[in-house]
Amino acid sequence: MIFKEILIRYGELSTKGRNKNDFIRRLRENIRYSFTDIWPLKIRAERDRMFIEIENDEKYEVLMQRLPEVFGIQSFSPVAACEKDIDAMKQLAIDIMAQYGDKPLTFKVEVRRTDKHFPFDTYMIQRELGGAVLSNHQNISVQVKKPDVELRVEVRYDAIYMMGQIIPGAAGMPVGSNGKSLLMLSGGIDSPVAGYLMMKRGVRLEAIHFYSPPYTSEHSLQKVKDLANELTKFGAKIRLHVIPFTEIQVLIKDRVPENMTMTVTRRMMLRIADKVREEIGALAIVTGESLGQVASQTLESLTAINAVTTTPILRPLIAMDKLDIIQIAERINTYETSVQPYEDCCTIFTPARPKTKPKAEKVAYFESFTEFDELIERAVKNREMHLLPAKKETVDKFADLL
Amino acid sequence: MNSNIIYLDNSATTKPHPEVLQTFLQVNEQYYANPASIHEAGVEANALLMRAREQIAGIVGTEAKHVIFTAGGTESNNFAIFGTAQANTHKGKHILTTKIEHPSVLEAVKRLAQEGFEVEYLAVNEVGIISLDKLREKVRPDTILVSIMHVNNEMGAIQPIAEAAAIIHAQSRALFHVDAVQSFGKIPVRFHDEHGPDLITISGHKIHALKGSGALLLRKKLTVAPFLVGGGQEFGLRSGTVAVPQAVALAKAARMAIEAMPEKQLQFEKWSNDLHAFLRKFGRDIHLLSSEAGAAHIVSFSVNGLKGEVLINALQQHGIIVSTSSACSSKQTTTSHVVEALNVIPSFKKGVLRVSFGAHTTDAHIEQFKKVFTVIMRDLKGENKE
């Protein structure tokens, strides 16, 4: 292993003045959370970058595999080091470039001299290392504009540091640096993507799901747990609140004109979500709504539904096309789970012709004949909570079959 | 089959492991529900199926959603070839393969050639290896598929897959299919992100699982046309109710093969070296088709002026089962295409024998084979002289 440490660049964090220390602390915590399996790691945080020491090959592999998923990292590079001796430097440059194999490759040497007393100047270092690499690797040639590999050499006081690769990170901000929100998680394709995008902006999530047995099955609930679990991989725990919703849904169907049931149902969901949000101290509600996608997501519908609360409702997908949403879902590994064919509470009792332009006052008028408040209180009180990631099942009943 | 028999035809098929049969039986008894059903039992069967997928995906370095269970090697090869060809005609119609592929590849590309695809075949040298320079010459920007087998089923030559992949990916957008039926479970078979194959064929019954089970493994989501259409099972690529017991048995056999591989490799190498040395002692009477450099579980050779069938019968009388060059072609009277491609001199063409080891082969089997073979050679040579 020629690499000694991994250099992490903060990217967007670097621009934040006073909160910077807090962000760095969060990022450090999230890295710790993401790598509990290979903990302890030696992390050294500086103002503009962070270093993780590489102790052995296994840790290196795991870090390289999962660092690209941690929010708050702009990019990272494995860094090799050697003593401040030109022959050692040449050898290290040759070793680093050997990692790229035999395919044709262009490169250049970039030098940063922090230690100005080092006897070789930038030009000399470039010439010496460039020459050494070229004579040892037939497949490599020099190109100054847009080379495949930029071999960065840093002359620091303690040693020489070199890196070839710059690997893009997930960008965004460390989860937790931007407060907490409640995600309405249905089990469809959109809501996990909405959750992911908010996490990327540093928001810590709790999730709420409406469960209507026997109209929706245990599997649809499992699917939602799986989705929430998938989201925890981006570096945070998620608490899932499961609301018993059957009673309210059945009552709506009985008491409200059919074409308005959908709007009323959404309003009830939002009222419940808002109560839960208040209890857990979250500041906003996140939904996977995308404008015009279904009847409940027209501007008129959104307005009529939104009328029940003044809490900010964050809709990160509002202007996104379905195909773009699916693309993200596939990338973050929630798509396969989302498309499992189980009914969720939004797809049962769907009216044949829901109003696409409901009026808030009119909807409220039809709601006024039924006492929903008490039912809402009860639903919130009787909710079940699950903390994810769930502990792995200890008994694996398939183990001996496989 | 008599239990005293010495079975040295493991490249034709293998005897299922008892543990694998146990799995097959148990899954049939407990998880027989259709994995596509949404009731409890179906969901459970599907969960088990997913575990089988994950296990195989882990072994070859891909994701569970890229493991497509099929009915075996032939189907997987057909699927890989027709599926990629039909879905990629907008990129070109040029297909490359080798002269020594399994018939399930050769016949498939032959059909494509009749449908207007341009198919080219790479020759092999006397030890059965393709030329990378020739490959470099033939891969073109409009090449859409290259299919190269990992280990040859008739004589064990190992193709330079990694080097071939580098050439193919550097010079074209072609998908690279590797038929790993004979190598999977014997030598490492893996995807290497964009530096290796794009599709890999594996088969169950060559690694002590059941006949009628196999898989086509994809490196990532690829443009492949569905092979069987219908209910949309296997991610829409291979319709038909998934045979969960076969799939789980395959996953288990694969795990067992991988776990035993370090030990088996040493054993196979020892036997391979031993047999090659033994056969060389016959001098000009025997021409070796395989070599110690090839896959260690296959030893293939030809006896001057004799028919393979005669040798097989003679060995069988002593309780030893081997085959001619391949099981598929052994009933045909013509010389196998692999033997033709190797440019074997005519008097050796008919007498090809293949000895192939499996998980149940022992030192005693090899010793017995050597003993019997020596006797047979003496007898048959004697007869020849009369």
Image (tube, coloured by chain):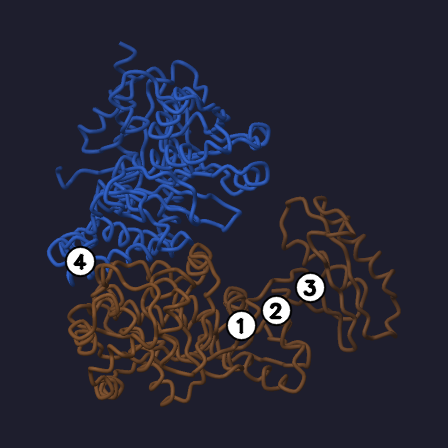
Chain colours: A brown, B blue
For the residue pair B115 and A109, the one nearer the viewer reads as: B115
Is B380 left or right of B100, judged from the image as shown? left
Quadrant of residue A192 within the rendered picture: bottom left
**Which residue lies under the disc numbered 1?**
A71
Question: CA separation, marks 3 and 1?
Answer: 22 Å
- Mark 2 on the same chain as mark 3: yes
- Amino acid type indicated by mark 2: Gln
For the residue pair B4 and B12, the one nearer the viewer reads as: B12
Q: Which residue is drawn at 39% across and 19% down?
A: B114
* Disc nearest the viewer among 2 and 3: 2
- Tags 4 and 1 in contact by the CB under 8 Å rule? no
Disc 2 chain ID: A
Local packing at callout 2 (Cα closer than 10 Å; few below 14, some 14-19, many 20+) is many
Residue B335 x, y percent position in the rendering: 34, 18
Quadrant of residue A340 within the rendered picture: bottom left
- Tags 2 and 1 in contact by the CB under 8 Å rule? no
**Which residue lies under the disc numbered 4?**
B42
- Amino acid type indicated by mark 3: Met
Quarter of the image with the C terminus of chain B in it: top left
Question: CA separation, marks 3 and 4?
Answer: 52 Å
Residue A108 x, y percent position in the rendering: 76, 55
Q: Residue at x 48, y 29 (%)?
A: B96
- Amino acid type indicated by mark 1: Phe
